[in-house]
Structures are given as C-alpha cells and as structure tokens.
Image (spheres, helix red, strand yellow):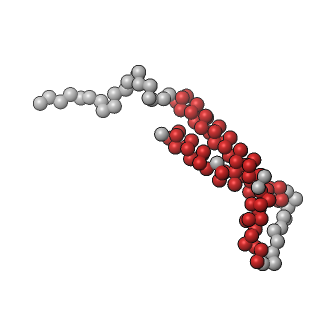
Amino acid sequence: MTQHAHSLDPIDPFDESKMTLMEHLMELRYRLMWIVGAVALGTMVAMSFSNWLIRLIAYPLSGYQAQLQALGPTDTIFIFIKVSFTAGTAIAIPIIAYHLIAYVA
C-alpha cells in the first residue's frame, strides 16, 4: 500500500468560516460594547435602589449599637457609586455571559 502525505488541515482560501484578525477584533469590539452598555444600564437601574441596597447590606448591624461611618469627605458618594456599580454588574451578568460565550464560540 502506498501512503500519500496529506496535510490534516488544508488551508482553503474560500472557507468563510475562518475570520481574519480584523474581523475578530471587530466582533470583540461589538461584544464589549454590548457588555459595557448592559453594565451601564444595570448601574443606572441599581442607582434608583441604592439606598435600599445599602440598608440591606447594613442590616446585620441592626442588632448592635453600630452605625455606618463616612471617614472621608467623598466616602458617602463613593459607597453609593460602588454599591450601584456592583449591583448593576450583577444585573448584567446574563448579558455578559451570553456575549462572552458567543464570542468564544
């Protein structure tokens, strides 16, 4: 029997399933814009509930004689923003997961 040397993965220049580097970068840009938009929208929604979320986080302290303290001049607003951003990211997790899986696939 004669064996021929064949490449296992021949390069087909007409195969459109393979993307160029620029096409990959454009798709990555598209997916990242969706993710950033989802996190931004989730953060805006969470900002309307941030006082409730802060009270929910501080609830375990209600049994003690303790209060939340702001030690710096900007701590109050930064806590508001951090809680809103964290909750907004949690809201956007399904969209983030979808676009990450869609990009990898």
Q: Quadrant of the N terminus?
A: top left
* Residue at position x 85%, y 61% in the image: 72
Q: Position of residue 61 (x, y in %)?
A: 76, 73
Left or right of 77 in this view: 60? left
From this view, report whether residue 62 is shown above or below residue 79.
below
Q: Position of residue 44 (x, y in %)?
A: 75, 47
Left or right of 15 in this view: 32? right
From this view, report whether residue 49 is shown above or below residue 38.
below
From this view, report whether residue 4 is shown above or below residue 72.
above
* Residue at position x 66%, y 51% in the image: 91
Regarding residue 7, the answer to whether it shows in the image is yes
Residue 10 in which image quadrant: top left
Residue 20 or 63: which is nearer the viewer?
Answer: 63
Residue 72 or 59: which is nearer the viewer?
Answer: 59
* Residue at position x 30%, y 32% in the image: 8
Residue 52 or 81: which is nearer the viewer?
Answer: 52
Q: Position of residue 103 (x, y in %)?
A: 53, 39
Question: Could you tell me how many numbered marks the image carries?
Answer: 0
| Residue, far right | 73
Left or right of 2 in this view: 52? right
